[in-house]
Amino acid sequence: MPAPARAHRPPRDRLDPAVLKLSGVLVLGAVAPLLDSTIVSVALHTLGDQLHASTATVQWVSTAYLLALAMVVPVSGWAAERFGARRTWIAALALFLAGSLLCGAAWNIGALIAFRVVQGVGGGLLLPVMQTLLVRAAGGQRLGRLMAVISLPALVGPILGPVAGGLIVGHLDWRWIFYVNLPVCVLAIVLALRSIPKDTPRGAAARLDLPGLALVSPGLAAAIYGLSQVGELGGFGHARVVVPLGAGVLLVALFVVRALRTAEPLVDLRLLRVRSFAASSVLMFTGGLTMFGGMFLLPLYYQQVRGAGVVTAGLLLAPQGLGALLARASGSLTDRIGPRAVVVAGLLLSALGTLPFVFVTGTADDVVLSLALVVRGLGMSAVNLAVMVGAFQGLEPADVPHASATVRILQQLGGSFGTAVLAVVVQRGLAHGTAAAFGHAFGWTVALTLLAVAVALMLPSRSPGEEPGTAPDVPKTPMAHRKHPL
């Protein structure tokens, strides 16, 4: 008797085509803000010249965007509940589109900085709401493969951003730095209106925690502003660093106390009772530190130590993007064996790929450094994918918006803190030579990456025989105050 045909069996290890289609639409929308940040950072010097602004003033083109983004991320979970994730996503895209159009039409540096705030509000909502939409659509299944799909914008930005920024600045008017976002946003909005399924918002039942908002949003903005001043001032011991950073830490601490006592906080920190989410949250902070810290160090190394131009430095960093693309296979691996082993292996690979830069010189072998960047990109991307899987395992659907906001906040704080610390390390090491200063900073990055291995051991693992997509070995924490599904 012939064996029954398998052609009609649904594939057990593939994402639902509807989820893949939704992922494509959302990824397209997320490309614009992630690409925009790197393009603008490359063009700051040109903006200062064209708009007759000092270096200190033109830095606010980036700082204003970053602060607006930090302030709005905590609101993303409430907005997804109040208005629906679909409406919030489309509104965020429209806001980012309007901000890009206004930035391109800015008549002076003050107007440009103000319009960057509009962009930052839209960009701050996009990424956490994207995670909410996709995790809910996937129903907790095949999260590793899903994270591999939605991580594409994060890979494209650092690779294409410096090159695109250099080409625009070199051949077009500076306004095209922002106008380049318009067709992407328009297309993403049209596709979103047609493809994203409608969800049922809670409406007025989702109450906004105004006292919590008054604490956490300015607290995050103050902390990130203080950290952003560290590199410029060369250390933490300055009033422009200590005052905003201290105020930010105090406000965030007060928010934590309130969030643990109120029934419906703006960001539900009780999710940290879930072991996998707590470990993932710490890793998002340390990952932001090492990832964004590396993004800060590597271009500067190629420009200041190796004497490369902006576009050349961007091309020299392309191998890291190749490694990150190769890491997409770790999504299916995470679904099969769980996030713990993947994160540990990814951290070790990331440390190994960073190690050659600890011993950098002005004449280091480009081939060796390129291979190291491939390994580093592979490790960092594998860690990010698996940590996101660990963050959402064991959570109820109603908790996903809060989890998305929390991990995004911690990644942003980790990135700001890491960049500030490494800027100080480089600044203080310059007395021993530029190459030695960067080598010392890369050494800190390796050490912090290895320390994160201990935290990674808290992530859930799955036995080889366990069905992919089932609950991990993490006890769920009931959220009695959140009985309503999104």
Image (tube, helix red, strand yellow):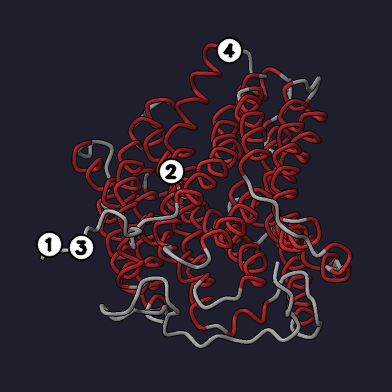
Quarter in which the C terminus is drawn: bottom right
Which residue has dot 2 on it?
Answer: 155
Q: Residues within 10 Å of mark 4 (few under 14, many from 20)?
A: few
Q: Secondary structure at mark 2?
A: helix
Query: Residue 278, position in %: x, y?
Result: 54, 78
The answer to whether residue 428 is left or right of residue 11 is right
Say which residue appears at 38% left-offset and 49% top-offset.
438
Which residue has dot 3 on it?
Answer: 4
Image height of 177 relative to 141, above or below:
above
Q: Nearer the viewer, residue 227 or 388?
A: 388
Distance from Cα at disc 4 to Cα at disc 2: 25 Å
Tell me the amino acid under the disc marked 2: Leu
- Asked if the residue under mark 3 is in contact with the one under mark 4, i.e. CB atoms within 8 Å, the reply is no
Q: Nearer the viewer, residue 134 or 293?
A: 134
Which residue has dot 1 on it?
Answer: 2
Which residue has dot 4 on it?
Answer: 172
- Asked if the residue under mark 1 is in contact with the one under mark 2, i.e. CB atoms within 8 Å, the reply is no
Q: Secondary structure at mark 1?
A: loop
Image height of 176 relative to 328, above or below:
above
